[in-house]
Image (cartoon, rainbow, N blue to C red):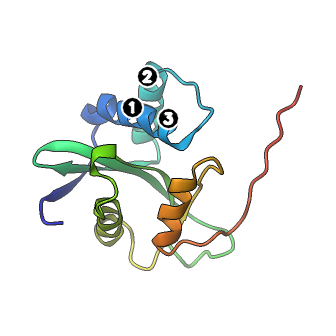
Amino acid sequence: MTDIDLRRATLNDVAALAEMNRQLILDEGSKNNMTLAELAERMRAWLTANREAVVVERAGEMIGYLLYREHQESYYPSQASIYVRQFFIQPSYRRRGIGQSVFEQIVAEFFPKGSAIMLDVLESNSEGKAFWLKLGFSIYHTTLRRESD
C-alpha cells in the first residue's frame, strides 16, 4: 500500500489511540470495562514505560495502530522477541488486505530482523484468530481462566 504511512506514536496521540482501543475492545468481545479516560491513562503509561506504538495513517487520517514491546524470552535468549499487545485497523478499512499489508510493513520497518512475534487472541474473537492464522501465526499455548465466587 503506497498511500499508507507509518510513524511512531507520541504522547500527543494518546486520546486517539485510547478511542481506537475502546473500539478494539468492543470488536474482540473483551470483558474489559475500562472507561475512555482509564484507557487513555493506561496508554500514556505504556508509551512512557516499555511499550512502543506505530500509528497507521492514510491521507493524514489515523486509521489504526499497533502496540508492542520487545522482551527477552528465557527459552530463546539469543533471539529478539516481540509481544504485540494490540493491533487495530478501523472497520471501514478492513477486508481489503490493508491489515495484512500494514502488519508486514511494521514487522519489516520497526521490529528487529528475525524476531519471534507473540500475541494473544481472545477465544471470543474468531475473526481476529482467523486473521492471525492467515498471517502465518500458529497456536503456541492456551490460557484458561476461571472466575472465582
The residue sitting at 34% across, 70% down in the picture is 104
> Residue 9 appears at what percent x and percent y?
28, 44
Residue drawn at (59%, 55%) of the image: 120
Confirm whether residue 87 shows in the render.
yes
Q: Position of residue 93 (x, y in %)?
A: 27, 51
Q: Residues within 10 Å of mark 1 (few under 14, many from 20)?
A: many
| 32 relative position to 145: left or right | left
Which residue was labeled with disc 2?
36
Asked whether residue 117 is in view, the answer is no
Which quadrant is the N terminus positioned in? bottom left
Q: Nearer the viewer, mark 2 or mark 3?
A: 3
Residue underneath mark 1: 18
Q: Give the spatial CA distance, label 3 vs label 1.
A: 13 Å
* Numbered tag placed on residue 139 in the rendering: none
- In the rendered image, the quadrant that contains the C terminus is top right
Q: Kindly check if marks 2 and 1 are in contact, taking CB atoms under 8 A apart as contact.
A: yes
Residue 87 versus residue 71 in the image, above or below? above
Residue 28, percent from left and from top: 53, 43
| Image-based side of 31 in relation to 117, left or right | right
Q: Amino acid at mark 1?
A: Ala
Q: Quadrant of residue 37?
A: top left
- Looking at the image, tell me whether mark 2 or mark 3 is earlier in sequence order: 3
Secondary element type, mark 3: helix
Give, as a three-letter code, the residue at label 3.
Answer: Leu
Mark 3 / mark 1, whichever is N-terminal = 1
Indicate the position of residue 119 as horizontal and vertical percent values. 55, 59
Disc 2 residue type (three-letter): Leu
Secondary structure of the residue carrying tag 1 is helix
